[in-house]
Amino acid sequence: MNKPEPKIRAVERPMRIAYVLEHGDDSHRWLDSIFAECFSRHGGRHSLIVPYGNSVISERYLAWIKAIDPDCVVLLTYQNREVAQTLSAVLGDCVFEQRTRVRGKVEDFPRVRGEGMALTSLSWIPFFQTVSGMQQHAVERILDQYPAWPDDGLIKDNFGTLHGSIPRYPMHEHIGVRPLILTPENPPENRWRFGVVDAEEISDAYSALTRIAHRGVATLAQMSNLNCQRFTHDHPWRDKFCLVIGDSLEDRIVCWNAGLLFDDATSQRYKTLRVPSTVLDDPESAERVAEFLRAVNWLGSNSGPSKIAVRSYSLDANVLTDFITRTQQQARSVVTFERVGTLDDCCPEQSSSFNKTYNTMLPASIATEVLAREAPAVINAPVPHHLRYCAGKHPAFSQGNWYVDLVIDKLNDHGRFSNIREAWKIPLRRQLIRQFVRVERSRILSSNDLSVPVSADAALIEITQPDDESFFHCLITDPGYREPSDILFERDKVATYRYAEPSDKGRYLAGLLGMFGSLYNVESVMNTRFWRRQLYGMAAPATDQRAEVKTLLQKRLKAKAGLLVIENDEGWARLAECVIQNASRLKVPRLRTRFDWLLKQWEEELNEAIEADEHLRRQADEIVRDASNELKRSLAFLVGQRIFYRGHEWVCRTCSHRNWTNLRSLDDEMSCEVCEAVHRLPVDVAMDFRLNEFLATCLREHDTFTVACILASIRRQSKLFFTFAPQTSIFKKYPEEQGGSPSRELDILCISDGRFIIGEAKARAELIAPSDIKDLAEAAVDLQVDMAVLAVLSDERSVMPDKLAQLRELLPESIAVQMIVAGWDDEPSSYL
């Protein structure tokens, strides 16, 4: 069965940013800047704020930021480089930007806006102006503020304003929406430097809550929380509105991060609210908060009144009792108090429980695909659905970048199944990005797919695919790189190894795969005991004489207790002489066979399989009756792959030389290759089948099938993607600089589900020497692989656990180790 046509699939999504914030004298100011920047971005409301304290990030926050997989991490600590190094081991491929902070120094005007400008949250306005529905209303007014208006935190923490988030101010006439402006009391009459058309001004933020609850009034918080990031469905906080009371940094962070637990603002616009503690002494403001909650919240109302959870890190229950009682009455909701013990309380229990946003009211993310029969392929960058409504409108709506996640089917697919085409799963090594795309700030996702930033001006993405040799050469010899703006950027970085090429053994494996067509075909044929015995019996007939040779050497060299000790040159000479004298005892390869010989052995194999299986015994007659046809089909495949050649073998009656004539050269009369005597072709000639000499050499001399078997075993373990390179020689300098002798040779070099794996492969466990283990460990550290493997076909002495333990001692914990004792299926074959 043929694999499906290769495709490239692209899905758009918002940019993802996370912030790491350390407590300090100016932390609240930095938090203000973070909130303002997040409100300005499409999807920005689902940006995670990671608290950093006592020189650590908690395990639960590490799991959370890993699940979010941010495109950029902005570091706001006093030791940014150390934090970046810690997170890089967890996150892999993302950009680490920093804002320098000095302990004891207060930053008056903190700014966290990064270099890569994201698509603005204002881009949703044309969509709502055009499309209306049950949950979608045209934007009549947008919340803004006069620059001198004092904010106690209610607006900047929960809703955002144009002045606070959008650099160009004012923009009301640009975006075509009338402003709802928060203005201090007694402002100057000539306060508007630019014309503000039909402005509605409010001096009290708590009075503004009533207007915000109205469907025609939009806020940046709402628009930055549409069709955005993933959420978790099993957190206990999700069944109630999260109302946080308090002014501490912990209160503000908890309330913000709690918003990431819910789905987006499509159905319910606001699900969290942080209220300053001053509201406890202001009954009128508290009443406004309750009225707002009554208007906008219906969480937990399926079987009764809506539910609200009052939470606080800085305040106790006894301080909040009166507020909770009044809110329950005025909001007509069930209101409970839940103390926030630590910042970890809002973290998901399981980071794997994140789901994509439900698109019940808004259209799903746009996806496109294109056939990728050859490289390079060009695909149209999918545009966020709502951005299509911005065509022809002010550039303020469509400026900025979003990301396109790419799933790229591999052209030369080594996948396990013949009817499924696998997509690239790229190890988290930034140097590999340039093998596929040449777009700045592209990255490899935690899912090992590619993601590319695009804008309204970049309509096309050009994608190339490297061949396997180029891919692994880049992986080994190209140093990883980071953007110059990245705190971990290193100038003139050089890789440990400068060059890589297939070794002699690797070339034999490449030839073998070219002959069979794929690793899948090698596995299918060699996993059949019948063909494996036939091929080894023809190419390497002495393999079953190992015990006989071992006994002979012990006897002739007088080995004691099964141990052969050679202490000097004389001992080596005796061993060589014994081998030479008894070489004639070994069976000589005979590379030819006939169909009737094969059929006889195939029937014997079938009978053995039938005897061992009750199910087969019920169908014994049918199986035996079809034996000839099944052998013909299988043999035809092997002939088609050039594993066998058809022809005629004949013995010269004059000189007894065995001649071989291929099918195309057969004639009625043929001359002997030695004495040129004429041989007449028999009338009833039967075709002979000659084993490919190259295949016989692979079996007999290079043990090529050992590596193929182990690669097939690793491939069976992979779930999504597998690719490999044949045995490879790697050089710390260019070959001409070190006399052509490689620094090391890698038997196993592959990618499995995005993990970079190297390994040592032998036919038997006792052949793995301590030097092999040491070389493998050094190469694994130099290449910073994900896993190092010791692999064998047999483990007669059960020594592999000890050898694996030796490897484990030589490697850091970041590199996993695995032992593989592979082997072909040794049960009697019941089919070919």
Image (tube, helix red, strand yellow):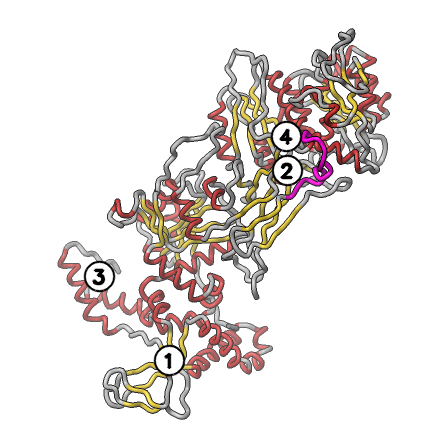
The circle drawn on residue 772 is none
Instruction: Give the residue number, with chain letter if any, for mark 2.
Output: 456
Q: Compare marks 2 and 4 and give the one earlier in the sequence.
A: 4
- Give the residue drawn at x 57%, y 30%: 116
Question: Where's residue 398, x and y in %?
Answer: 67, 33
Residues packed near mark 4 inside 10 Å, few (<14), some (14 to 19) or many (20 plus): many
Q: Compare marks 3 and 4 and give the one earlier in the sequence.
A: 4
- Give the residue drawn at x 77%, y 21%: 179
346 or 675: nearer the eye? 675
Question: Which span of residues is magenta-colored?
Answer: 382-396
Using the image, determine if residue 162 lies above or below residue 497. Answer: above
Dot 2 falls on a residue whose secondary structure is: loop
Dot 3 falls on a residue whose secondary structure is: loop
Q: CA distance from mark 3 to mark 1?
A: 49 Å
Instruction: Give the residue number, with chain letter if any, for mark 3.
Output: 559
- Which residue appears farthest toward the left when viewing the image? 570
Q: CA distance from mark 3 to mark 4?
A: 72 Å
Q: CA distance from mark 3 to mark 2?
A: 79 Å
Q: Amino acid at mark 1?
A: Asn
Q: Compare marks 3 and 1 and give the one earlier in the sequence.
A: 3
Residues packed near mark 2 inside 10 Å, few (<14), some (14 to 19) or many (20 plus): some
Q: Nearer the viewer, mark 3 or mark 2?
A: 2
Q: Amino acid at mark 3?
A: Ala
Instruction: Give the residue number, with chain letter if any, for mark 1.
Output: 662
Instruction: Give the residue number, with chain letter if any, for mark 4.
Output: 47
Q: Amino acid at mark 2?
A: Ala
Question: Where's residue 568, x and y in %?
Answer: 14, 55
